[in-house]
Image (cartoon, rainbow, N blue to C red):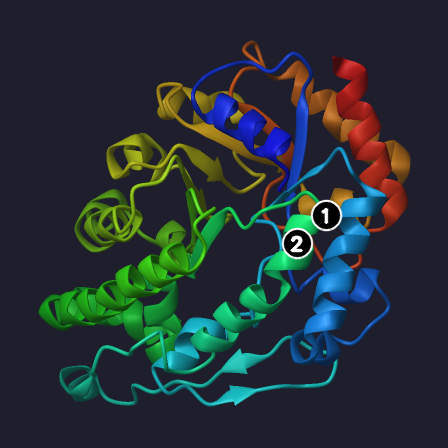
Amino acid sequence: MTNEQWKSLVDIVNGKTPAEPVVGFIIDSPWLPGWNDISIMDYFADGRIWFDANMKAIEKFPDVMFLPGFWSEYGMCTEPSAFGSKCVWPENEFPNAAKVINDNSDIDKMIKPNPKTDGLCPFVIKRLQHFAPEIEAKGHSIRFAVSRGPLNLASFLMGMTEFLILMKTEPDKAHKLLGTITDFMVDWIQLQAESFETVDGVLILDDIVGFLGEDDFKEFAMPYLKRAFDAVDVTVKFFHNDAEGLVCTPYLSQIGINLFNPSFKHPLSELKRLSAGKVAILGNIPPRDVLARGTVDDVKASVKELAASLDDKGGIIYSCGGGMPPDTPTDNIEAFYQAVKSMG
């Protein structure tokens, strides 16, 4: 992100309404490889290809805020690999991480990984260190420390169904697992912040939060998310959950979150009401069915409908409800941007 974009983002999370509406998208490996006509494996394996793919997006859409910006990631495998997950790497499909917990008793044997040395974490840091001079030469900076969330990681390590059952049948073991994961997350976030002095934001992604009821959210998600977001003192605390988001929205500001990327299924006006206007929102048109698969006219109509639903247009970064989906075409992104700008 450029200094100007970062200042705009900080102003929005601080409650200021920008003079012109702002467009932003989360971009990473589901979208960038295909849009650049490269394989997913090449995107992960070659730092130069990764850098050039990100630069192409930035140069094609210079007025769009891409978050977190030069995201150095290996799909869903980065953090699970540190716990010993076997990672499977198809040439042009998303990688996946195998379970490491096959019996609930395995939780008692877990040891907190060291992000400086374990799994793919050091590769994430090295890639950014290698390309930081070029990123900065292009007028951008590394702004965010990023991690998958505690429930998300638990579901990878033992299976989502198994983890959800564990919370109800052996809550003490669920807490022990989440505690170990969160201890690792704190170390991981702190390592990223220590490695890059320009980091002033934290992005945590956890869709499993959306599978919980309110009581379970308050017991099994809220304290661990808060501890992870409190790992470093930063200006922007950004949470992505594009599953059910209404359960967590009233509690976001208590956790310290000031920017939220929710599901497109929730009206922005309702999210603003539930968060008492204390949390900026990145959203919120349908990502797959409209932004990726719709026509240019579909995109324009969806943006118009979104704008018409808002009495208060403050605290909004116009986007889709989730990350940029695979196969989103250039024309639709341009149509989205132009439709938003015409509102101003």
* Badge number at residue 135: 2
Residue 56 screen position, x and y as percent: 81, 54
User: Three-letter amino acid code at disc 2?
Assistant: Ile
Name the residue rendered at 51%, 86% in the picture: 87
**75 over 205 or under it: above or below:** below
Q: On the image, which quarter does residue 102 sit in? A: bottom left
- The reply to whether the C-beta atoms of the residues labelled 1 and 2 are less than 8 Å apart is yes
Residue 19 vs residue 239: left or right? right
Name the residue rendered at 25%, 43% in the picture: 214
Residue 33 screen position, x and y as percent: 76, 67
Residue 230 vs residue 76: left or right? left
Q: CA distance from mark 1 to mark 2?
A: 5 Å
Which of these two is toward me, 3 or 274? 3
Quadrant housing the N terminus: top right
Name the residue rendered at 34%, 40% in the picture: 248
Name the residue rendered at 74%, 71% in the picture: 48
Which of these two is toward me, 146 or 255? 146
Check the image and name the residue furthest to the left: 172
Residue 146 vs residue 268: left or right? left
Residue 284 screen position, x and y as percent: 61, 34
Q: Is residue 149 visible?
A: no
Q: Which residue is mark 1?
A: 138
Question: What kind of element bears circle 2?
Answer: helix
Residue 228 vs residue 282: left or right? left
Q: Is residue 227 visible?
A: yes
Quadrant housing the C terminus: top right
